[in-house]
Image (cartoon, rainbow, N blue to C red):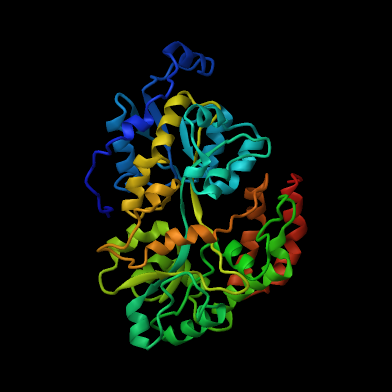
Amino acid sequence: MRTPVIARRTFLGQAAALAGMTALTACQLIQRQPAGEPAQAATEITFMNWDTVKDTPLEIAIQEFERQNPPYKVKVQPTPARYEDKMRTLLAAGTPPDVMRINDDYVRGYSVKNQLLDLTPYLKADNIRREDYFEFVFDFAKQPDGKYTAWSIGNQPRLIYYNVNAFKDAGVPLPPTEWTSKDWTWDDFLARAKKLTVEGQRWGALIYDDTGFEQTFAVNNGEEDGIYSKDGKKFTLANPKGAEAIQWAADLTCKHKVQPEWSLLRQEGANNMFVAGKIAMFFRTQGIIPYLRRNIKNFEWDVAPVPAKVKQMTEGSLIVFCIPKAAKNPDGGWRLLRFLGGPGGGKIFAETSYFIPAMKEPARLIKAGKEPPAHVELFVKAMEYQTTVNYTENTERARQIYRPELELVYTCKARADDILTKVRPLVEDALVGKY
């Protein structure tokens, strides 16, 4: 189904903001080609994203970039299945596209392998100022050696989405409309979930199927480092507070019966269940807004902050792209990324509530309108309450070890502390490169 498409606008003044880019000559571009490879036209920018680009605000932004920057053309490559495998293969073969979406948690690992282009010269040449951006977004890709090996164009904070009609029908007080812990703690959340649950018809809550809950709820339970230690070598989710948070989320199903069973979620899909009115509250990123706007027809819905315990933080999903070292047109790739992460792209992403732009100024455009959620500005507020997973050089391998084991907890076959204690040595060996 199509995402509502906003009309293209003329962004006056943006062309001037993009002026001054120094393009390499055709000869210089050819010198960057891998041996034996035909030279790519300097005006073509190849682009790969793990989500479908067509009929999304990202497509609108790319089209606007092309309109403002003739004769550049962005060639969007098909979204591949098994994206990470495809990405590794292309990088290893030296045949990557000019711009690639990259998991923010894996930037450190690819950087250590020296596969990503340092963007620092572009940042300096274009006078990109840190103070114009949300600092944690601007700084996240800065490596210990000072190199910027990726570029984030925005962030999708996670909040609690809820069915307003279900609350009213059950006579349950609505969640807060501002970022506060007043009457909105874990206990308050559970109490509401119990009242909202109607056996055989509706579950009150859903938390544990969004992997962002690991960091968010561990930190909010008092595990300061979240999943990994600051040096990226310890599996701190296995500490008592981290394990307790995982168990709390699992107990919404195993003990309290207010959350759908793990197997049912795999069959029906959580998003579909919320749209169908089968879930009253669930934890999701801002990126789901276009889907909900398209598909919810029979009830009112809104968003609320994450419930509090020791803290009231939330983890967002950064929208991150990189330019591989072997890219054929790195200068064109940077020109595109600069637009997407600047005022031009930011305006499009803000007006569609697709995500919070990296730049502060366009983020101010996100305000409640005719379409839900009524309190969409809470996503902007969430930028002040961001918790970010500490980076490691081997996050992907660590996840391959512990996440499958946690399914035993989510299916009520084991306790979180037992599972996390068991896998901790293996995970920590992986973090330091023994796997």
Which residue is rendered at x = 31% and y = 44% of the image?
54
Asked whether the viewer can see residue 78, the reply is no
Residue positioned most to the top: 27
Image quadrant in which you'd find residue 45: top left
Which residue is rendered at x = 54% and y = 27% of the image?
121
Front residue of 393 and 19: 19
Q: Is residue 175 left or right of residue 234?
A: left
Asked whether the viewer can see residue 93, the reply is yes
Q: Is residue 96 above or below residue 278?
A: above
Q: Is residue 142 above or below residue 396?
A: above
Q: Quadrant of the N terminus?
A: bottom left
Residue positioned most to the front: 131
Front residue of 403 and 119: 119
Which residue is rendered at x = 48% and y = 13% of the image?
28
Q: Position of residue 263 (x, y in %)?
A: 50, 70
Q: Is residue 43 left or right of residue 393?
A: left
Q: Is residue 187 left or right of residue 280?
A: right
Q: Position of residue 255 (x, y in %)?
A: 58, 83
